[in-house]
Amino acid sequence: MMSDPNLLSTPLFSVQQIKAAEVNAVKSGCVSLYELVERAGHAAFELLSERQANTSKVLVLAGHGNNAADAYITASLLLKSGFDVELQASLASHPSDELTQAINCFQVSGGETKPFDVTKIAIATIIVDGLLGTGIKGELSSELTKVINTVNGSNAWILSLDVPSGINPNTGSYQQTAIEANMTLVFGGLKKGLLTGKARHCCGEIKLANIGLNEFLPESSTAQINSFTLENTFLPRRRDAHKGNNGKVSIIGGDYGMAGAVRLAAEGCLRSGAGLVTVISRPEHQFIVSATRPELMFWGCELVDMEVYLKLGWASVLVIGPGLGNDDWGYNLLKAVDLTDKPCVIDADGLTQLSGMPMADKDWVLTPHPGEAAKLLGLSIAEVEKDRFSAAKRLHQKYKGVIVLKGAGTIIFDGNQYYVAPVGNPGLASGGCGDVLAGVIGGLIAQGYKSIEAACLGVVIHGSAADLAAQEGERGMLASDLMPYIRQLVN
C-alpha cells in the first residue's frame, strides 16, 4: 500500500529568480545589497571557523563582481579572528558600490590585495573561491583559466562561494574549465544547475546559507528530490493483500546475446514490489532467466503472434527496451506495444528504435541517457549536456509522456515540473544499471503510482541503492548489487 505521495522536495531556482528576490528584499526596506553581502561573508566565515583551526593559512581568490565582495568580507572576518589570510584578486575597473565597501572593510581590517600568483596558489592548503560566482559570461580570460587550472591541480581544500567559478548555475555546464571544490556554500536559494551535469563533480558537498531571501523567493517549477523523498511514501501493505493487488508487468527485450539486460530489468521490477512479472524474450533465454530467478515467468518469442499480444494484454504495465536490439525482431515488438493502451516504460534499445518511428503522445516514461537523448533529438551528446534542462524539455515537446534524462543529477520532466535527483555515483556507470531502473519504474507504476511519481521515486530508489552499495566501493559495483538495497528502500 502507498500513501498519497505529494513528493517531498526542495525548491530550486534560476539565477534570475534569486536576483529578483534580492531586488525585492531591498525594495521592501528589510535589507540593503551590502547587508546581503555581509550576511554571505559571515556565513562563509562561520563555516571556515568551524572546519579549520585559526592557525591555518587561507588563500582567498576574488574577481570583481559581488561574489568577490563576499570573498573580501570573508577575508576581513578571518583576519579579525586571527587567521593567516592572503587575498589575491583581479582589480575591477568599475567596481560596484558593494564591492568598493567590501574592499574598504578588508583594508581596514589590515588586509592587502595582491595580484594572482600561481606559484602560491599551487602550494595553498585552504582556498576560498570568490572569482566569478553567478557572474560568468562568455569565455574565461587566459589569466582566469590558468588560475582555475592551478587551483584544481593543488592539494588544497577548496570552498567555493555560491557557485564554483566557471560553472553556469542555470545549466550545470561549463565552457572551458571550472573550480573543482570540496564544498560549495550557496547563498539565498539553491541554484538548479548545481545539482546536475558537470556541476555534480565541481560543487563537492553543497551547503545552503540563509541570508534572508526566503520570503522573497517565487514559486518554482524545479525541485530537488533525494532519499528524504522516500519518507512516509510506502505504507505497510494490508494483511489480506495478494499478488494481484500489486500489479502485473511484462518485460520485453533480450535479443540474441542480451539475456542479462531483460533479466536485470525483471528482477528490479520484482524487487520494487510488483506482484507478477513475465519476461518476453528469445526462447533461448528461458534457462538464463528462470534458473537464476525462478519467481519470474517467461514467454519465448520468435515472432510477434497472437500469443505475444495476449501476454501484452495480460499485463497492467509494459517495460520494453533492455537488450531489445535494433533489428526487425525488436522493431516488431515495439510496434506491438504501440498498438496497446498500456502504460509503458521505454529504455535502452527501445529508445533507439523509437527515434526512427512515428510514435508520440502516449502514457509512457522514456529513460534516455545522454547518448540516447541525442539520437532522439538529432543532436550531439555535447549539445544535450550543455543544457540538460533544455534537452529534457525538448524531449517532452517531441515525445510527451514523462522524460527521465539520466546522468549525473538525473532530470525528470512531465511538461510542468522539473525534478532533479542528485543521487547515485560513478559505480552506476556499468552495464545493466539502467535496465534495473527501467524495471523499478515499471514496478512502481504497476503498484498504482502515477507515471511522474513512479519516475521520481524510481530514480531516487535506484540512486540511493547505488549509494548504499558503494559503501563497499564504487569500482566493481554491479547492477545486481543494487537488488537488496532496492528491497530495503521500498520498505
Image: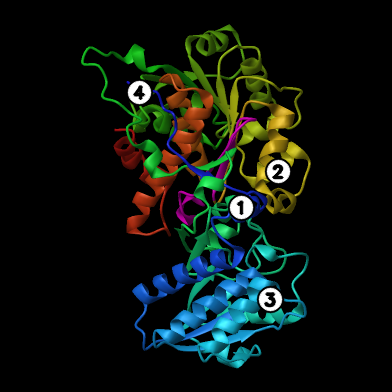
Which span of residues is magenta-colored?
A: 409-430
Res 432 visible: no
Q: Where's residue 10, x and y in %? A: 47, 43
- Tell me the residue that label 3 is attached to: 64
In the rendered view, how is the structure colored?
rainbow
The kind of secondary structure element at disc 1 is: helix
Q: Taking 14 as reference, is 54 left or right? A: left
Residue 2: assigned label: 4
Image depth: mark 2 or mark 1 in front:
1
Q: Give whichever of discs 4 and 1 has the lower sequence position.
A: 4
Q: Give whichever of discs 2 and 3 has the lower sequence position.
A: 3
The kind of secondary structure element at disc 3 is: loop
Q: Where's residue 204, x and y in %? A: 48, 64
Q: Is residue 471 magenta?
A: no
Image depth: mark 2 or mark 3 in front:
3
The kind of secondary structure element at disc 2 is: helix
Residue shown at 76% from the left, 49% from the top: 380
| Quadrant into which the N terminus falls | top left
Q: Where's residue 281, x and y in %? A: 52, 25
Residue 390: assigned label: 2
Q: Give whichever of discs 3 and 1 has the lower sequence position.
A: 1
- Separation of marks 2 and 3 at Cα, in angstroms: 30 Å
Q: Residue furthest left?
A: 239
Which amino acid is tagged 3? His
Residue shown at 45% from the left, 35% from the top: 458
354 or 311: which is nearer to us? 354
93 or 342: which is nearer to us? 93
